[in-house]
Amino acid sequence: MNKNVPLSGLWAIILGGSSGFGFASVEMLAQKGMNIAVLYRETSITEKVLLKKFSKIASECGVTVLPYNINALDLQEREKFIKKFTSEQSVSRHKVKLLLHSIARGNLKPLTGTANANEELSAEDIGFTSYAMSNSLLDWTRMILKAGLFHPDGRIIGLTSEGAHKHWQGYAAVSIAKASLESLAKYMAVEFAPLGLKTNLIQAGITNTSSLKMIPGSEKLLEIANTRNPMGRMTQPNDVAKVIYLLCTDEAFWINGSIIHVDGGEHCR
Protein backbone atom coordinates (compact mmCIF):
# COMPACT_ATOMS: atom_id res chain seq x y z
CA MET A 1 0.00 0.00 0.00
CA ASN A 2 1.24 3.47 -0.90
CA LYS A 3 1.87 5.35 2.37
CA ASN A 4 0.68 8.56 0.74
CA VAL A 5 -2.74 7.04 0.04
CA PRO A 6 -3.32 4.81 3.09
CA LEU A 7 -7.09 4.58 2.52
CA SER A 8 -6.84 3.48 -1.11
CA GLY A 9 -9.69 1.24 -2.24
CA LEU A 10 -11.88 2.06 0.74
CA TRP A 11 -15.09 4.10 0.79
CA ALA A 12 -16.60 6.85 2.87
CA ILE A 13 -20.28 7.74 2.95
CA ILE A 14 -20.63 11.39 3.91
CA LEU A 15 -24.04 12.72 4.87
CA GLY A 16 -24.07 16.46 4.31
CA GLY A 17 -20.97 16.90 2.18
CA SER A 18 -21.66 20.04 0.17
CA SER A 19 -20.10 22.55 2.58
CA GLY A 20 -18.41 23.04 5.94
CA PHE A 21 -16.95 20.02 7.71
CA GLY A 22 -18.51 17.59 5.23
CA PHE A 23 -16.94 19.14 2.14
CA ALA A 24 -13.59 19.61 3.88
CA SER A 25 -13.68 15.90 4.69
CA VAL A 26 -14.35 15.04 1.04
CA GLU A 27 -11.19 16.95 0.10
CA MET A 28 -9.05 15.46 2.88
CA LEU A 29 -10.14 11.84 2.51
CA ALA A 30 -9.80 11.95 -1.27
CA GLN A 31 -6.20 13.10 -0.83
CA LYS A 32 -5.64 9.98 1.26
CA GLY A 33 -6.96 7.72 -1.49
CA MET A 34 -10.49 7.14 -0.22
CA ASN A 35 -13.44 6.88 -2.60
CA ILE A 36 -16.45 8.87 -1.46
CA ALA A 37 -20.21 8.75 -1.80
CA VAL A 38 -21.35 12.22 -0.84
CA LEU A 39 -24.97 13.07 -0.06
CA TYR A 40 -26.37 16.59 0.03
CA ARG A 41 -29.37 18.78 -0.72
CA GLU A 42 -28.73 21.55 -3.23
CA THR A 43 -30.64 23.44 -5.91
CA SER A 44 -29.83 22.70 -9.54
CA ILE A 45 -27.94 26.00 -9.79
CA THR A 46 -25.70 25.47 -6.76
CA GLU A 47 -25.25 21.80 -7.61
CA LYS A 48 -23.60 22.65 -10.94
CA VAL A 49 -20.77 24.41 -9.12
CA LEU A 50 -20.54 21.63 -6.55
CA LEU A 51 -20.32 18.89 -9.16
CA LYS A 52 -17.40 20.69 -10.82
CA LYS A 53 -15.60 20.75 -7.47
CA PHE A 54 -16.21 17.05 -6.90
CA SER A 55 -15.01 16.22 -10.41
CA LYS A 56 -11.83 18.23 -9.86
CA ILE A 57 -11.14 16.51 -6.54
CA ALA A 58 -11.69 13.06 -8.05
CA SER A 59 -9.43 13.79 -11.01
CA GLU A 60 -6.59 15.30 -8.99
CA CYS A 61 -6.64 12.57 -6.32
CA GLY A 62 -7.32 9.59 -8.60
CA VAL A 63 -10.40 8.49 -6.65
CA THR A 64 -14.11 8.07 -7.29
CA VAL A 65 -16.52 10.66 -5.92
CA LEU A 66 -20.17 9.72 -6.34
CA PRO A 67 -22.59 12.63 -5.78
CA TYR A 68 -26.16 12.05 -4.58
CA ASN A 69 -28.50 15.03 -4.34
CA ILE A 70 -31.11 13.35 -2.14
CA ASN A 71 -32.91 13.76 1.16
CA ALA A 72 -30.84 11.61 3.52
CA LEU A 73 -33.62 11.77 6.11
CA ASP A 74 -36.22 10.05 3.94
CA LEU A 75 -36.50 6.25 4.16
CA GLN A 76 -37.33 5.71 0.49
CA GLU A 77 -34.50 7.99 -0.59
CA ARG A 78 -32.08 6.05 1.61
CA GLU A 79 -33.22 2.77 0.13
CA LYS A 80 -32.78 4.16 -3.39
CA PHE A 81 -29.28 5.30 -2.48
CA ILE A 82 -28.26 1.88 -1.14
CA LYS A 83 -29.58 0.19 -4.28
CA LYS A 84 -27.82 2.62 -6.61
CA PHE A 85 -24.61 2.73 -4.60
CA THR A 86 -24.26 -1.05 -4.46
CA SER A 87 -24.89 -1.28 -8.21
CA GLU A 88 -21.78 0.78 -8.98
CA GLN A 89 -19.08 -1.44 -10.47
CA SER A 90 -16.39 0.10 -8.28
CA VAL A 91 -18.26 -0.63 -5.05
CA SER A 92 -17.89 -4.00 -3.36
CA ARG A 93 -19.08 -5.39 -0.06
CA HIS A 94 -17.21 -4.68 3.18
CA LYS A 95 -15.46 -1.60 1.76
CA VAL A 96 -17.20 1.27 3.59
CA LYS A 97 -14.63 2.34 6.14
CA LEU A 98 -16.41 5.51 7.26
CA LEU A 99 -19.92 6.80 7.79
CA LEU A 100 -19.69 10.53 8.53
CA HIS A 101 -22.84 12.24 9.76
CA SER A 102 -22.57 15.96 9.00
CA ILE A 103 -26.24 16.84 8.50
CA ALA A 104 -27.11 20.32 9.74
CA ARG A 105 -30.88 20.65 9.46
CA GLY A 106 -33.06 21.93 12.25
CA ASN A 107 -35.15 24.67 13.74
CA LEU A 108 -33.62 27.75 15.33
CA LYS A 109 -36.51 29.20 17.30
CA PRO A 110 -36.78 30.39 20.91
CA LEU A 111 -38.73 28.42 23.48
CA THR A 112 -41.24 31.24 23.74
CA GLY A 113 -42.39 33.70 21.08
CA THR A 114 -43.20 37.01 22.73
CA ALA A 115 -45.30 38.33 19.86
CA ASN A 116 -45.94 35.47 17.48
CA ALA A 117 -46.72 31.93 18.58
CA ASN A 118 -45.43 30.66 15.23
CA GLU A 119 -41.98 31.76 16.32
CA GLU A 120 -42.05 29.41 19.31
CA LEU A 121 -40.24 26.11 19.18
CA SER A 122 -42.79 23.30 18.92
CA ALA A 123 -42.58 19.65 19.86
CA GLU A 124 -42.64 18.88 16.14
CA ASP A 125 -39.68 21.23 15.59
CA ILE A 126 -37.73 19.42 18.30
CA GLY A 127 -38.65 16.01 16.90
CA PHE A 128 -37.58 16.91 13.36
CA THR A 129 -34.30 18.46 14.51
CA SER A 130 -33.49 15.51 16.76
CA TYR A 131 -34.07 13.03 13.96
CA ALA A 132 -32.07 15.05 11.43
CA MET A 133 -29.07 15.66 13.67
CA SER A 134 -29.12 12.59 15.92
CA ASN A 135 -31.37 9.59 15.42
CA SER A 136 -30.89 9.40 11.66
CA LEU A 137 -27.33 8.26 12.33
CA LEU A 138 -28.70 5.04 13.82
CA ASP A 139 -30.95 4.39 10.82
CA TRP A 140 -28.08 4.94 8.40
CA THR A 141 -25.77 2.67 10.37
CA ARG A 142 -28.30 -0.15 10.45
CA MET A 143 -29.03 0.18 6.74
CA ILE A 144 -25.36 0.05 5.75
CA LEU A 145 -24.85 -2.94 8.03
CA LYS A 146 -27.83 -4.75 6.56
CA ALA A 147 -26.43 -4.21 3.07
CA GLY A 148 -23.11 -5.74 4.14
CA LEU A 149 -21.17 -2.64 3.14
CA PHE A 150 -19.20 -1.82 6.27
CA HIS A 151 -15.53 -2.69 6.44
CA PRO A 152 -14.69 -5.20 9.22
CA ASP A 153 -12.97 -2.29 10.99
CA GLY A 154 -15.46 0.46 10.23
CA ARG A 155 -15.72 3.95 11.70
CA ILE A 156 -18.81 6.01 12.51
CA ILE A 157 -18.29 9.70 13.20
CA GLY A 158 -20.81 12.35 14.19
CA LEU A 159 -20.50 16.03 15.02
CA THR A 160 -21.58 17.59 18.28
CA SER A 161 -21.03 21.11 19.61
CA GLU A 162 -20.48 23.14 22.74
CA GLY A 163 -24.08 24.28 22.37
CA ALA A 164 -25.18 20.88 23.69
CA HIS A 165 -23.95 21.93 27.14
CA LYS A 166 -24.57 25.67 27.36
CA HIS A 167 -27.13 28.21 26.23
CA TRP A 168 -26.88 29.68 22.74
CA GLN A 169 -29.62 31.95 21.49
CA GLY A 170 -32.22 30.09 19.42
CA TYR A 171 -30.26 26.84 19.69
CA ALA A 172 -32.58 24.83 21.96
CA ALA A 173 -33.75 22.27 19.37
CA VAL A 174 -30.21 21.69 18.08
CA SER A 175 -28.86 21.53 21.62
CA ILE A 176 -31.42 18.84 22.47
CA ALA A 177 -30.46 16.97 19.29
CA LYS A 178 -26.73 17.17 20.03
CA ALA A 179 -27.24 16.01 23.62
CA SER A 180 -29.27 13.10 22.26
CA LEU A 181 -26.52 12.33 19.75
CA GLU A 182 -23.94 12.16 22.53
CA SER A 183 -26.04 9.60 24.40
CA LEU A 184 -26.79 7.65 21.23
CA ALA A 185 -23.10 7.51 20.31
CA LYS A 186 -22.23 5.93 23.66
CA TYR A 187 -24.74 3.15 23.14
CA MET A 188 -23.69 2.65 19.53
CA ALA A 189 -20.06 2.45 20.63
CA VAL A 190 -20.92 -0.45 22.94
CA GLU A 191 -23.55 -2.31 20.94
CA PHE A 192 -21.93 -2.04 17.50
CA ALA A 193 -18.39 -2.78 18.70
CA PRO A 194 -18.84 -6.57 18.33
CA LEU A 195 -19.64 -5.88 14.66
CA GLY A 196 -16.31 -4.12 14.17
CA LEU A 197 -17.64 -0.56 14.28
CA LYS A 198 -16.11 2.25 16.33
CA THR A 199 -18.37 5.22 17.05
CA ASN A 200 -16.96 8.62 18.02
CA LEU A 201 -18.05 12.24 18.03
CA ILE A 202 -16.10 15.38 17.25
CA GLN A 203 -16.78 18.63 19.07
CA ALA A 204 -15.33 21.32 16.86
CA GLY A 205 -14.56 24.81 17.99
CA ILE A 206 -16.54 27.78 16.71
CA THR A 207 -16.11 27.67 12.93
CA ASN A 208 -17.24 30.19 10.35
CA THR A 209 -19.53 27.88 8.36
CA SER A 210 -22.86 28.50 6.65
CA SER A 211 -24.57 26.45 9.38
CA LEU A 212 -23.14 28.61 12.15
CA LYS A 213 -24.24 31.80 10.41
CA MET A 214 -27.84 30.63 10.60
CA ILE A 215 -27.75 30.63 14.42
CA PRO A 216 -29.24 33.82 15.93
CA GLY A 217 -26.43 35.82 17.52
CA SER A 218 -23.73 33.93 15.62
CA GLU A 219 -21.92 37.23 14.99
CA LYS A 220 -21.18 37.43 18.71
CA LEU A 221 -19.87 33.85 18.75
CA LEU A 222 -17.57 34.66 15.85
CA GLU A 223 -16.36 37.85 17.49
CA ILE A 224 -15.12 36.08 20.62
CA ALA A 225 -13.80 32.97 18.86
CA ASN A 226 -10.34 34.32 18.10
CA THR A 227 -9.78 35.92 21.50
CA ARG A 228 -11.10 32.90 23.42
CA ASN A 229 -9.06 30.31 21.54
CA PRO A 230 -5.63 29.65 23.11
CA MET A 231 -4.20 29.11 19.63
CA GLY A 232 -5.10 32.65 18.63
CA ARG A 233 -7.34 31.79 15.71
CA MET A 234 -10.70 30.30 14.87
CA THR A 235 -11.17 26.61 14.08
CA GLN A 236 -11.17 25.87 10.35
CA PRO A 237 -13.13 23.08 8.60
CA ASN A 238 -9.83 21.52 7.52
CA ASP A 239 -8.75 21.21 11.16
CA VAL A 240 -11.73 18.94 11.73
CA ALA A 241 -11.29 17.06 8.46
CA LYS A 242 -7.75 16.11 9.47
CA VAL A 243 -9.00 14.49 12.67
CA ILE A 244 -11.74 12.67 10.78
CA TYR A 245 -9.00 11.22 8.60
CA LEU A 246 -6.94 10.26 11.68
CA LEU A 247 -9.92 8.40 13.12
CA CYS A 248 -10.03 6.31 9.93
CA THR A 249 -6.47 5.08 10.29
CA ASP A 250 -5.42 1.74 11.73
CA GLU A 251 -3.71 3.58 14.58
CA ALA A 252 -7.14 4.84 15.77
CA PHE A 253 -8.46 1.29 16.16
CA TRP A 254 -8.82 1.55 19.95
CA ILE A 255 -10.70 4.88 19.99
CA ASN A 256 -14.36 4.16 20.59
CA GLY A 257 -17.15 6.01 22.38
CA SER A 258 -15.19 9.26 22.65
CA ILE A 259 -16.04 12.92 22.24
CA ILE A 260 -12.94 14.48 20.76
CA HIS A 261 -12.45 18.22 21.08
CA VAL A 262 -11.02 19.66 17.89
CA ASP A 263 -10.82 23.30 18.87
CA GLY A 264 -7.25 24.22 19.76
CA GLY A 265 -8.19 24.17 23.44
CA GLU A 266 -11.13 26.56 23.08
CA HIS A 267 -13.30 24.44 25.37
CA CYS A 268 -10.85 24.98 28.22
CA ARG A 269 -11.91 28.62 28.55
Image (cartoon, grey):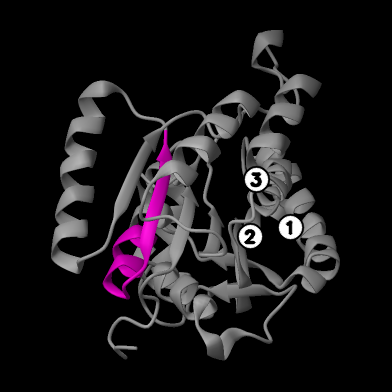
Between 34 and 166, which is closer to the camera in this rendering?
A: 34
Residue 128 in view, yes or no: yes
The magenta region covers 24-40
- Percent x, y of residue 116: 66, 8
Image-quadrant location for residue 57:
bottom left
The residue lying toward the viewer, choosing from 138 and 1, is: 1
Residue 134 shown left or right of residue 211 in the figure = right
Q: How busy is the neighbourhood of tag 2: few (under 14 within 10 Å), some, or many (20 plus)?
A: some
Where 127 falls versus 64 (above or below)?
A: above
In the rendered image, the vertical position of residue 77 relative to residue 251, given as above or below: above
In the structure shown, which secondary structural element does the residue marked by tag 3 occupy? helix
Q: Amino acid at mark 2?
A: Glu
Q: Residue at x 82, y 58 (%)?
A: 183
Q: On the picture, is 262 further left or further right than 89?
A: right
Q: CA distance from mark 1 to mark 3?
A: 26 Å
* Residue 122 seen anywhere in this rendered image of the structure: no
Dots 2 and 1: beta carbons under 8 Å? yes
Q: Which mark is residue 140?
A: 3
State if disc 3 and disc 1 touch (CB < 8 Å): no
- Which is closer to the viewer, label 1 or label 3? 3
Question: Which of disc 2 and disc 3 is earlier in sequence?
Answer: 3
Q: Amino acid at mark 1?
A: His
Which residue in the protein does label 2 denote? 162
| Mark 1 residue element | loop
What is the CA distance from the residue labelled 3 to the residue labelled 2?
A: 24 Å
Q: Amino acid at mark 3?
A: Trp
| Front residue (pair 148, 100) | 148
Mark closer to the chain start, 1 or 3: 3
Query: Is residue 267 rendered to the left or right of residue 126?
Result: left
Element class at badge 2: helix
